[in-house]
Amino acid sequence: MRVLMATVGTRGDVQPPLALARTLKAAGHEVTLAAPPDFVSWIESHGVRSLGLGIDFMSWAESNRHTVGSGGAVMREVFRVLRDNVREEF
C-alpha cells in the first residue's frame, strides 16, 4: 500500500509520525512523510521518503523569538502561523 502522511510543527510534532512511517515501511508499505522543510534530511536519514511542505517552522520560530512577545502572545502567533500554514498546504 502507498501511504502519504503529513505533519507540521516542531520535532515533537514530526517524530511520532516518523515512527509510524518507519513501522509501515518495515511492514513493506511505500511511505512518504510530508513535513516542514527543515526536517526533510532528518526524516530521510531514517530511511523514510520525505517531502518538504509548508514553512521552515524552526527557522521562523528562531527569527521571531524576540519579536512575538511572551506567554500567551507567543502561543497566539504560533497558532496563527500554523493555521495559515495548513491552509496554504492543503
Image (tube, rainbow, N blue to C red):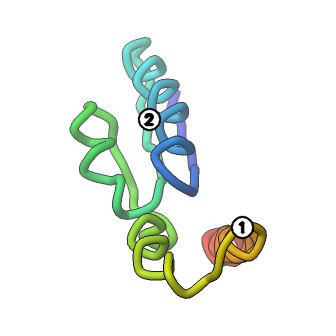
In this rendered view, identify the residue nearer to me: 43 or 27: 43
The disc placed on residue 54 is none
Q: Quadrant of the C terminus?
A: bottom right
Residue occupying image coordinates x 22% and y 38%: 45
The span from disc 2 to disc 1 (Cα, nearest Å) is 37 Å
**Element class at badge 2:** strand
58 or 56, nearer to the observer: 58
Left or right of 77, for residue 40: left
Give coordinates of residue 32: x percent, y percent: 43, 43
Residue name at image x 71 percent, y 67 percent: 71
The spot of residue 66 in percent (x, y) is: 50, 82
Residue 50 in picture, x, y percent from top left = 36, 49
Number of the front mark, 2 or 1: 1
Residue 37 x %, y %: 37, 64
| Residue kind at label 1, given as amino acid type | Gly
Residue type indicated by callout 2: Val
Q: Is residue 57 above or below residue 11?
A: below
Q: Give the residue displayed 56% in from the left and 56% down from the top.
A: 9
User: Hey, which residue is sitting farthest bottom in the picture?
Assistant: 67
When the figure is inspected, residue 36 is found, relative to residue 5, above or below; the finding is below
Q: Give the residue displayed 43% in from the left and 12% down from the top.
A: 27
Instruction: Report the residue that reaches farthest toward the front.
Output: 70
Q: Is residue 88 left or right of residue 34?
A: right
Task: Determine which residue is flagged by label 1.
Answer: 71
Residue at the extreme top: 27
Up/down of 24 relative to 14, above or below:
above
Disc on res. 31: 2
**Quadrant of residue 83 within the rendered picture:** bottom right
Secondary element under disc 1, as helix, strand or loop, is: loop
Instruction: Say few, some or many: other residues with alpha carbon within 10 Å of mark 1 (under 14 / 14 to 19 / 20 or more).
Output: few
Numbered disc total: 2
| Label whose residue precedes the other's in the sequence (2 or 1) | 2
